[in-house]
C-alpha cells in the first residue's frame, strides 16, 4: 500500500527515533549535530510534521544509513510534507494532531459516555455538535459534522485499524436528537460490531463508580504491537494530546480497569439491541 502523509510521517518518525535511541542519544545532541532544533526533531519523530529533503539527508548522513534505507528516507520525505485536509481546516492543533494519528492508526482504544466519532451516524453527529456547542454559527456546525464524518473513511482502508470502544451505559439511554435518531444510532453501533476489527463493549450501570466517570479519552497506536503513542482528551476547555510515557501509562492503566468492568462483546451487543428496540417515538 502506498504511503499517505500520515503513514509516511509515522514510518519516518519511528525510524529516526529508533536510530537515535539505539545510539543512546538525546534529542538535543542529535539536533545540535545536524543543525535542527530539538523541538523540530521531536515533532518529526512523533510523526506530527513533515521534513525537508535537505534535513532528511543530513539525518541520513549523521546516522550512516545504508543505501537501501537512505533511499527509503528520500522517498518518504516529500510525502511527509504533503498537506492533508485536516491540516488546512480551522481546528485546534491538538485535534489536527489526533486526526493525523487516527488516519495512520493500527489501533484505536476509546472510552466515553457518548458514541465515538468514528461510529456516529450523521443525524446523531449533527445533534451532538449542535447540542454541545455553546455559541457556534450554523455554518461552523455543518463544517464540523462534515469533518467528523470524513474521518470515518479510515474504517474503509484495505487494512483498517482495530477499534476497541468502551461506552458507559448512559451513552445508550441519553437521547441525542430525537428517539428515531437515537434508535438509528444504536442500530448503527450494532452494525459496526459486525466488522471484524470493531468491538463495542458497555460498562453497565450496575458497575457503579469507575475510573472513567469524569472523563473521556482515546488512545491511538500506529505500531504493530498496538502500544499507545498518543492520548487525546476532550473537555469543555478544549482538547489535549498527551505523548509522555507517564501519561500513556496512566491512561493505559485506566483503560485496563474499564475493560475489566465492561460486559463481554456478546452481552454488550444484546444490551445495545434491547435498548434500540425499546427506543421508540413518543405517541
Image: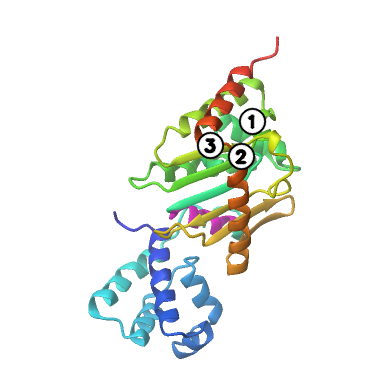
Q: Which image quarter: residue 233?
A: bottom right
- Between 102 and 51, the residue placed more toward the observer is 102
**Residue 253: image location, x then y, percent:** 61, 57
Callout 1: 10 Å neighbours few (<14), some, many (20+)? many
Residue hosting label 1: 172
**Residue 38: image location, x then y, percent:** 54, 81
Residue hosting label 3: 264
What secondary structure prevails in the magenta region? helix
Of the image marks 2 and 3, the number of the one nearer the N terminus: 2
Secondary structure of the residue carrying tag 2 is strand
Image mark for residue 77: none
Q: Residue at x 49, y 77 (%)?
A: 41
Q: How is the image coloured?
A: rainbow
Residue stretch in magenta: 95-105
**Residue 240: image location, x then y, percent:** 65, 59
* Discs 1, 2 touching: Cβ within 8 Å: yes
- Between 52 and 94, the residue placed more toward the observer is 94
Of the image marks 1 and 3, the number of the one nearer the N terminus: 1
Q: Which image quarter: residue 57?
A: bottom left
Separation of disc 1 and disc 3 at Cα? 16 Å
Q: Which image quarter: residue 70?
A: bottom left
Q: Residue furthest bottom?
A: 33
Residue 104, magenta (yes or no): yes
Residue hosting label 2: 167
| For residue 106, side relative to residue 89 (left or right) | left
Amino acid at each position: 500500500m502506498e504511503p499517505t502523509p500520515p503513514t509516511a510521517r509515522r514510518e519516518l518518525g519511528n525510524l529516526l527515533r529508533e536510530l537515535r535511541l539505539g545510539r543512546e542519544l538525546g534529542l538535543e545532541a542529535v539536533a545540535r549535530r545536524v543543525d535542527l532544533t530539538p523541538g523540530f526533531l521531536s515533532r518529526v519523530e512523533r510523526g506530527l510534521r513533515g521534513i525537508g529533503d535537505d534535513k532528511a539527508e543530513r539525518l541520513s548522513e549523521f546516522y550512516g544509513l545504508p543505501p537501501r534505507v537512505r533511499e527509503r528516507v528520500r522517498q518518504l520525505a516529500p510525502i511527509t510534507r504533503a498537506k492533508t485536509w485536516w491540516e488546512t481546516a480551522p481546528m485546534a492543533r491538538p485535534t489536527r494532531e489526533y486526526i493525523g494519528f487516527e488516519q495512520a492508526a493500527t489501533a484505536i482504544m476509546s472510552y466515553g459516555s457518548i458514541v465515538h466519532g468514528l461510529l456516529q451516524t450523521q443525524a446523531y453527529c449533527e445533534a451532538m455538535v449542535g447540542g454541545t456547542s455553546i455559541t457556534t454559527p450554523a455554518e461552523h456546525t455543518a463544517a464540523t459534522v462534515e469533518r467528523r464524518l470524513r474521518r470515518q473513511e479510515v474504517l474503509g482502508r484495505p487494512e483498517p485499524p482495530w477499534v476497541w470502544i468502551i461506552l458507559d451505559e448512559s451513552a445508550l439511554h441519553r437521547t441525542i436528537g430525537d428517539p428515531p435518531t437515537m434508535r438509528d444510532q444504536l442500530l448503527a453501533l450494532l452494525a459496526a460490531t459486525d466488522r471484524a476489527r470493531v468491538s463495542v463493549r458497555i460498562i453497565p450501570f450496575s458497575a457503579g463508580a469507575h475510573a472513567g466517570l469524569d472523563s473521556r479519552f482515546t488512545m491511538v497506536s500506529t505500531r504493530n504491537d498496538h502500544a499507545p503513542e498518543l492520548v487525546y482528551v476532550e473537555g469543555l476547555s478544549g482538547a489535549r494530546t498527551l505523548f509522555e510515557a507517564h501519561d500513556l501509562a496512566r491512561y493505559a492503566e485506566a483503560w485496563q480497569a474499564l475493560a475489566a468492568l465492561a460486559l463481554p462483546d456478546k452481552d454488550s451487543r444484546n444490551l445495545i439491541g434491547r435498548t434500540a428496540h425499546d427506543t421508540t417515538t413518543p405517541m
